[in-house]
Image (cartoon, helix red, strand yellow):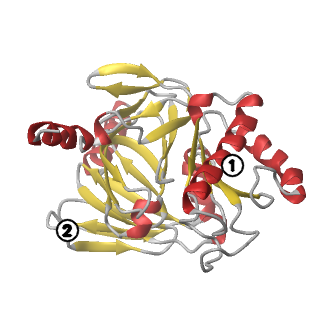
């Protein structure tokens, strides 16, 4: 009996002495193909490139061993770690009526999604960037774009979001969604883009 | 305005924002988990902002998840120590440099805009390796 215990302790010690750093490549999120992780030398050359999902590389100073695993094993060993990843940031775009800070009817009907998304994320931070079309002077558009962004920020704060978690900025007519010449009405450029992180 | 005051103005205006600026926020915490900042312990709870050089620390039952301002996401598993050594990000060009060190424990990563813009500009160090991230989702494990 003592003998067997001694052997298993010895085996455990051997395993821990050999354990080295491991990298496991996962499939991309939502069906996106997986990218790659390179194991680099001190000078930045790739010693190995892991580019197939469910490949696990065990990295030692001298050798890198790659082996295949599968979804079921990864779920068993790392499911909790993967599920603890924060939710992916989500983007929203809301549109405005010409020259105003009034949301279009369609955007008004969709803004509840934004409120729900922000509410569902503890510690959410919200970036709001206002834009305009190229109609009107660029300085007036800078002002209007910022007013549009601040309107969305105000609506969020009124619904209980901590003001320190919201950033609002205006980009005027500098970042057009639909490229146009100067002085052109364009409904899709009159917008606020929001990133909820 | 004298040349001297212009120079001082420029120096102040050009001060790197890195020292105090937010690089990430805590999103989820469970069990025993905290942040170490300049050797001091900072409570980890959702919404807490992280800075360059902060260290994520979890105990035997702890988990800590954060999202960076380039949309990179980390989830640190139990018994882990992950140091956020360097984080520079230009939100306009998406260029940057991001280096963290998994001293021990486990870390799941979904890379963000820095890795997407330029391969290997996001690096993870482990005791045995330097990993160059090329836009992807992966797990790193380092035995204590």
For label 2, the residue is A44
| Label 2 secondary element | loop
**Is residue A147 visible from the viewing direction of this image?**
yes
Q: Residue at x 48, y 65 (%)?
A: B136
Q: Residue at x 24, y 72 (%)?
A: A47
| Label 1 secondary element | helix
* Quarter of the image where one finds residue B81: top left
Question: Left of B5 or right of it: where is B119?
Answer: right
Whether tag 1 and tag 2 are in contact, CB under 8 A, the answer is: no
* Quarter of the image where one finds residue A185: bottom right
Does A28 appear above or below A75? below
For label 1, the residue is A148
Question: Left of B112 or right of it: where is A188?
Answer: right
What is the x, y in percent for residue A100?
Answer: 76, 53
Chain to which mark 2 belongs: A
Q: Residue at x 36, y 63 (%)?
A: B95
């Amino acid at each position: 009996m003592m003998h067997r215990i001694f052997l298993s302790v010895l085996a455990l010690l051997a395993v821990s002495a050999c354990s080295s750093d491991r990298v496991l490549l996962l499939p991309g999120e939502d069906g996106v193909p997986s990218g790659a992780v390179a194991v680099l030398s001190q000078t930045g050359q790739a010693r190995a490139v892991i580019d197939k999902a469910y490949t696990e590389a065990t990295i030692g100073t001298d050798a890198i061993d790659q082996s295949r695993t599968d979804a079921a094993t990864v779920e068993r060993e790392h499911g909790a770690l993967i599920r603890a990843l924060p939710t992916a940031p989500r983007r929203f775009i809301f549109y405005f009526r010409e020259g105003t800070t009034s949301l279009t009817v369609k955007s008004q009907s969709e803004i509840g999604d934004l409120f729900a998304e922000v509410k569902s994320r503890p510690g959410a931070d919200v970036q709001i960037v206002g834009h305009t079309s190229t109609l009107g002077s660029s300085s007036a558009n800078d002002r209007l774009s910022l007013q549009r962004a601040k309107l969305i920020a105000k609506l969020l704060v009124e619904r209980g979001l901590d003001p320190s978690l919201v950033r609002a900025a205006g980009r005027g007519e500098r970042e057009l969604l639909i490229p146009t010449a100067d002085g052109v009405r364009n409904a899709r450029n009159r917008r606020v883009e929001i990133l909820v992180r | 305005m004298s040349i001297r005051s212009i120079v001082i103005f420029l120096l102040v205006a050009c001060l790197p924002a890195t020292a105090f600026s937010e690089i990430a926020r805590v999103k989820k915490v469970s069990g025993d988990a905290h942040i170490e900042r300049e050797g001091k312990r900072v409570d980890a709870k959702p919404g807490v902002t992280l800075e360059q050089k902060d260290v994520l620390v979890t105990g035997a039952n702890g988990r800590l998840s954060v999202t960076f301002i380039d949309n990179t996401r980390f989830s640190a598993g139990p018994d882990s120590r992950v140091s956020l050594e360097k984080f520079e990000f230009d939100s306009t060009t998406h260029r940057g440099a991001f280096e963290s060190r998994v001293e021990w424990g486990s870390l799941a990563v979904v890379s963000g805009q820095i890795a997407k813009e330029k391969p290997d500009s996001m690096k993870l160090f482990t005791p045995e390796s330097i990993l160059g991230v090329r836009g992807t989702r992966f797990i790193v494990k380092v035995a204590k």
